[in-house]
């Protein structure tokens, strides 16, 4: 009987399976600008092979189809949040209500309470404190420092017009729905 090698299943630790959102964004922007050559897209996104470009585009297509399927069956972020909220308010089990509240906190980014610094101050407060000490005549840092001027480049008119259009579109999208 012939000895065969064992089959190994890989979970998702390798780049082949990883969600490469950075490359996806670069590919979308490049394709919006009219670049459709897979070899050029590979170079822009920093991918190793042209097959990686196609794999990334497949991931995006599958994700789009998945979101469309969710919307067809009535699953939206509103329905998910409403379900979690109703669980947190109406569940008879304290453990279930606690888990629902923890899920809501995690979705807001409030689940971790890590110690930022030993002093309890952020970097802004430290800089302001050093500036205040300097104004009072207390030397906070010894040594000589070089002063320099910052020359801000002039923005071209067409770029400024594009920014104005983007701001107007953003206001229309985000503030117009209220």
Image (spheres, helix red, strand yellow):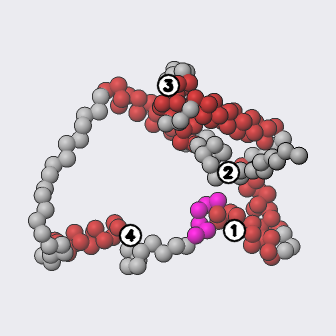
Gap in angstroms between the C-alphas marked 2 and 4: 37 Å
Residue 122: numbered disc = 4
Q: Position of residue 85 (x, y in %)?
A: 75, 62
Which residue bears the numbered disc 1? 102
> Does 132 lie within the magenta span?
no
**Taken as a whole, is the magenta stretch helix, strand or loop?**
loop
Q: Which residue is mark 2?
A: 12
| Alpha carbon separation for disc pair 2 and 1 | 27 Å
- Name the foreground residue: 98 vs 161: 98
Residue at 60% across, 45% down = 15
What is the number of the mark on residue 51?
Answer: none
Query: SS for tag 1?
Result: helix
Quadrant holding the C terminus? top right
Q: Residue at x 84, y 41 (%)?
A: 73
Depth check, front residue: 42 or 130: 42
- Residue at (73, 56) in percent of width and height: 81
Marks 3, 4: nearer the viewer: 3
Q: CA distance from mark 2 to mark 3?
A: 27 Å
- Give whichever of discs 2 and 3 has the lower sequence position: 2
Marked residue nearer the N-terminal end (2 or 1): 2
The picture quadrant where one finds residue 36 is top right
Q: CA distance from mark 4 to mark 1?
A: 27 Å
Q: Earlier in the sequence, mark 3 or mark 4?
A: 3
In-image side of 92 versus 22 (left or right): right
Query: In the rendered structure, which segment of residues is drawn in magenta?
Result: 107-112
Which SS class for mark 4?
loop
Above or below: residue 23 compared with residue 113: above
The mark that comes first in sequence, 3 or 1, is 3
* Residue position marked by numbered label 3 in the rendering: 40
Q: Give x and y (percent) for residue 125.
A: 33, 70
Give the number of the mark in front: 3 or 1.
3
């Amino acid at each position: 009987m012939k000895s065969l090698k064992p089959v190994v299943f890989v979970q998702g630790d390798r780049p082949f399976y990883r969600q490469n959102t950075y490359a996806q964004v670069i590919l979308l922007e490049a394709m919006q600008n009219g670049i459709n050559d897979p070899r050029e897209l590979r170079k822009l996104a920093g991918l190793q092979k042209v097959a990686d470009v196609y794999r990334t585009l497949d991931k995006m297509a599958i994700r789009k189809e998945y979101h469309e399927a969710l919307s067809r069956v009535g699953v939206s972020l509103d329905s998910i949040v409403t379900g979690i909220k109703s669980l947190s308010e109406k569940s008879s089990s304290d453990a279930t209500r606690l888990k629902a509240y923890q899920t809501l906190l995690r979705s807001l980014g409030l689940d971790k309470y890590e110690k930022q610094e030993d002093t309890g101050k952020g970097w802004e407060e430290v800089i302001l404190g050093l500036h205040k000490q300097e104004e009072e005549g207390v030397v906070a840092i010894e040594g000589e420092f070089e002063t320099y001027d910052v020359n801000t480049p002039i923005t071209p008119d067409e770029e400024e017009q594009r920014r104005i259009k983007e701001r107007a579109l953003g206001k229309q999208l985000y503030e117009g729905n209220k």
